[in-house]
Image (cartoon, rainbow, N blue to C red):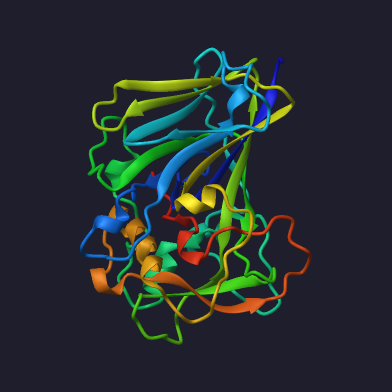
């Protein structure tokens, strides 16, 4: 098949750091496979970074029946999407809603409803500055967006994914079990509410449609520490559009089909998983005062949502400020 679209989805603990020109975004999948064994935050649920794809699309596996998904474990790897000849894709990404004021968006106003704008990915910077913390919590450490080997601590990372082409949108928002939109308030796990707290609807998923001009597409991985090559997977499309999904969720989320009950105002120990994003920040708040999204109230959507969210707010994606 000469030319097709690769749809790439992101779910769960994925942090997005867009380049200042908006034509590239780095996606950081946090390493929380041993979350439940860390004494400083007991009660966590392990999260697993995986790439999900239809098994029969893998080159050489066409005898696999359709409908069987493969889960590719991602551990300490740099992930790039290349065309079937092994060439990098052009850096011409189009991020929906991107502009010079993206770092200060979104603003929750009466009557507004979320759309496909990237602004609805939870902002770490706004979460912190609106609680009185110094600017910089949303700034990612420069070493994380540098070339390999990374000049940063790789312990917090399961994978770094480069997205350079296509149209990137928010494709799902966090809903409660009745299909109502969740408005999240950012506060620390045990912190009191403040009038100035950041409030916003939350993205539950991000996707990007990437045009591929060759007959196949290659997902290439390299070691974050050495930069050396690791496993690569070549996919052979069976239609005009194929889908891969980068998921960083609790194990049950890979299989369940129903939405998670979301309660307002309360926090659970497992909600502190969101604090992991701040390990990549240049100037995070103190460990006991890290803002995380807490469901504050529900709003009827303007129209029937196409696809319910499967994750509660703390498992939602987050975004860092634009970077060089």
Image quarter in which the N terminus is found? top right
Q: Is residue 36 above or below residue 127?
A: above
Residue 168: quadrant of the picture: top right
User: Residue drawn 37% across and 70% down?
Assistant: 128
User: Residue drawn 62% across and 32% down?
Assistant: 68
Q: Position of residue 59 (x, y in %)?
A: 57, 16
Q: Position of residue 190 (x, y in %)?
A: 34, 80
Q: Position of residue 274 (x, y in %)?
A: 39, 62
User: Residue drawn 63% across and 59% down?
Assistant: 258
The tally of labels here is 0
Q: Is residue 294 visible?
A: yes
Q: Position of residue 275 (x, y in %)?
A: 34, 63
Q: Nearer the viewer, residue 247 or 203?
A: 247
User: Residue drawn 23% across and 58% down?
Assistant: 38
Residue 139: quadrant of the picture: bottom left
Q: Is residue 220 above or below residue 154?
A: above
């Amino acid at each position: 098949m000469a030319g097709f679209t690769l749809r790439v989805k992101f779910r769960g603990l994925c942090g997005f750091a867009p380049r200042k020109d908006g034509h590239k975004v780095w996606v950081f999948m946090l390493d929380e496979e041993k979350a439940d064994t860390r004494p400083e935050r007991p009660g966590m649920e392990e999260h697993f970074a995986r790439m999900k794809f239809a098994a029969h699309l893998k080159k050489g596996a066409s005898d696999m029946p359709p409908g069987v998904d493969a889960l590719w474990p991602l551990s300490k790897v740099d992930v790039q999407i290349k065309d079937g000849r092994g060439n990098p894709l052009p850096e011409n990404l189009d991020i929906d809603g991107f502009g010079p004021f993206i770092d200060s968006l979104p603003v929750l106003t009466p009557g507004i409803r979320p759309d496909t704008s990237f602004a609805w990915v939870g902002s770490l910077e706004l979460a912190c500055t609106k609680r009185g913390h110094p600017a910089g919590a949303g700034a990612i450490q420069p070493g994380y967006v540098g070339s390999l080997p990374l000049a940063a601590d790789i312990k917090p990372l399961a994978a770094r994914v480069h997205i350079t082409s296509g149209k990137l949108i928010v494709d799902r928002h966090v809903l409660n079990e009745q299909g109502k939109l969740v408005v999240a308030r950012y506060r620390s796990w045990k912190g009191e509410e403040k009038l100035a707290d950041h409030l916003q609807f939350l993205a539950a998923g991000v996707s990007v449609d990437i045009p591929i001009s060759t007959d196949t597409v290659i997902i290439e991985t390299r070691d974050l520490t050495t930069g050396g090559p690791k496993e690569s997977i070549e996919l052979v499309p069976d239609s005009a559009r194929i889908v891969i999904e980068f998921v960083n969720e609790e194990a049950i989320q890979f299989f369940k089909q129903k939405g998670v009950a979301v309660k307002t105002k309360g926090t659970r120990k497992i909600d502190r998983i969101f604090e992991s994003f701040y390990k990549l920040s240049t100037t995070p708040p103190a460990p006991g005062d890290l803002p995380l999204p807490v469901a504050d109230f529900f709003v009827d959507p303007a129209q029937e949502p196409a696809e319910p969210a499967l994750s509660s707010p703390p498992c939602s994606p987050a975004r860092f400020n634009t970077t060089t």
